[in-house]
Image (cartoon, helix red, strand yellow):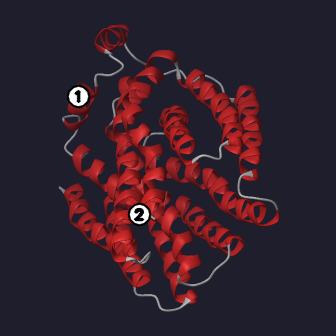
């Protein structure tokens, strides 16, 4: 379990290191150009995954995948911020996350079926095909969005931009707004749960409750469906009552659901609290993204989005890594859910910083 947690964490270790450099690349080379390059690379790397059979080679590939994935997520996030109407940041994020959630719903279900009928590695061929279709679709429909930046500002940004000026970028992010630091930590806490979810739901389901791969895929798909159904409504409400209330409620729900998932003694009980935990993500994620859209300056959306998105990588590193160590030390794959409950309780207090 510890080796599995470390292998998964390698993706996000690479992502954490390359968030800011690739964010600066987005500002310099354009959102669409970086996005299309990443889609082409992702399509190729899926084919490479199919042929890998050595754990060391897999670890190296995970690290490379983390870098390429960042090159997709940052320009995608920046484009959504560019297109978001004022006073509708939460609703815009809700719409985007609802549509993107379709992949998270179908992905686990399809993967479970393919793994049962053929073999798990055949999913990578399917992945490459889907990404190639996404590239073709993007080339056809995606148009440039003009962002109004004064020439003097643009010249200054080009002068100070350095691809690996991580310290400077992080320092600038911290002083960007009084909510920048608590927002960063809330994103870390949320993604700790997501990292634990994607590793230990499967392990717990199979080792503790005896659930097969196909059913695990359906459960994960159902969790993603719950998120998808709630994204738009939560984003819509946030724009009217304020995201701080929904974010706080989301972490309270995540604390309760993950704690009772840890205490589960039957399969229906465990699945029920997993579905509740998935719903909490839909209450938190649009809010953190909406606040980030509001406080990040337009002229540095690539760079500052890279800094903010590094919080997601940090959470996705700490989730599987620490969760795997805890599970290994206690010989119980249920313990990572208690870990999430403790983290969620801390997030409740951090979210109160947004109320000031």
* Label 1: how many Cα within 10 Å (few below 14, some 14–19, many 20+): few
- Quadrant for residue 325, please give it: bottom left
- Quadrant for residue 347, please give it: bottom left
- Depth order, front residue of 127/97: 127
Q: Residue at x 34, y 61 (%)?
A: 322
| 32 displayed left or right of 242 | right
Residue 161 vertical placement versus 349 (above, below): above
Residue 269 image point, x, y percent: 52, 88
Whichever of labels 2 and 1 marks the residue nearer the N terminus, that label is 1
The reply to whether the C-beta atoms of the residues labelled 2 and 1 are less than 8 Å apart is: no
* Label 2: how many Cα within 10 Å (few below 14, some 14–19, many 20+): many
| 41 displayed left or right of 203 | right
Residue 158 image point, x, y percent: 35, 11
Residue 226 vertical placement versus 177 (above, below): below
- Depth order, front residue of 178/308: 308
Whole-angstrom CA distance, mark 2 to mark 1, is 27 Å
| 66 displayed left or right of 324 | right
Q: Number of marks in the image? A: 2
Residue 241 image point, x, y percent: 37, 61
Residue 329 at least partly seen: yes
Residue 115 vertical placement versus 312 (above, below): below
Q: Residue at x 23, y 66 (%)?
A: 346
Q: Residue at x 73, y 40 (%)?
A: 128
Residue 183 image point, x, y percent: 29, 50
- Quadrant for residue 302, please give it: top left
Residue position for label 1: 167
Label 2 SS: helix
Residue position for label 2: 193
């Amino acid at each position: 379990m510890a080796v599995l947690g470390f292998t998964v964490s390698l993706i996000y270790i690479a992502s954490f290191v390359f968030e800011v450099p690739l964010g600066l690349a987005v500002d310099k080379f354009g959102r669409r150009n970086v996005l299309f390059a990443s889609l082409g690379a992702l399509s190729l790397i899926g084919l490479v995954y199919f042929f890998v059979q050595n754990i060391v080679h897999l670890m190296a590939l995970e690290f490379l995948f983390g870098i390429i994935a960042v090159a997709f997520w940052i320009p995608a996030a920046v484009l959504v911020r560019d297109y978001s109407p004022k006073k509708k940041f939460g609703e815009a994020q809700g719409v985007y996350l609802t549509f993107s959630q379709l992949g998270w719903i179908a992905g686990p279900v399809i993967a479970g079926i393919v793994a049962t009928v053929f073999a798990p590695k055949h999913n990578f061929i399917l992945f490459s095909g889907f990404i190639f279709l996404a590239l073709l679709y993007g080339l056809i429909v995606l148009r440039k969005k003009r962002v109004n930046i004064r020439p003097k500002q643009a010249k200054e940004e080009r002068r100070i931009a350095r691809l690996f000026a991580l310290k400077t970028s992080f320092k600038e992010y911290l002083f960007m707004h009084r909510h920048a630091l608590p927002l960063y930590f809330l994103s870390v806490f949320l993604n700790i749960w997501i990292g634990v979810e994607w590793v230990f739901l499967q392990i717990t389901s199979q080792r503790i409750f005896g659930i097969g791969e196909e059913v695990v895929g359906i459960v994960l798909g159902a969790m993603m469906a719950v998120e998808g159904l709630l994204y738009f409504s939560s984003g819509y409400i946030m724009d009217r009552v304020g995201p701080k209330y929904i974010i706080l409620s989301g972490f309270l729900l995540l604390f309760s659901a993950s704690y009772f998932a840890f205490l589960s003694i039957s399969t229906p009980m465990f699945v029920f609290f997993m579905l509740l935990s998935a719903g909490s993500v839909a209450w938190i994620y649009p809010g953190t993204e909406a606040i980030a859209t509001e406080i990040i300056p337009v002229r540095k959306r690539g760079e500052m989005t890279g800094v903010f998105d590094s919080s997601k990588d940090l959470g996705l590193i700490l989730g599987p890594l620490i969760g795997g160590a805890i599970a290994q030390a206690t010989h119980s794959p249920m313990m990572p859910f208690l870990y999430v409950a403790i983290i969620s309780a801390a997030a409740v207090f951090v979210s109160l910083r947004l109320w000031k």
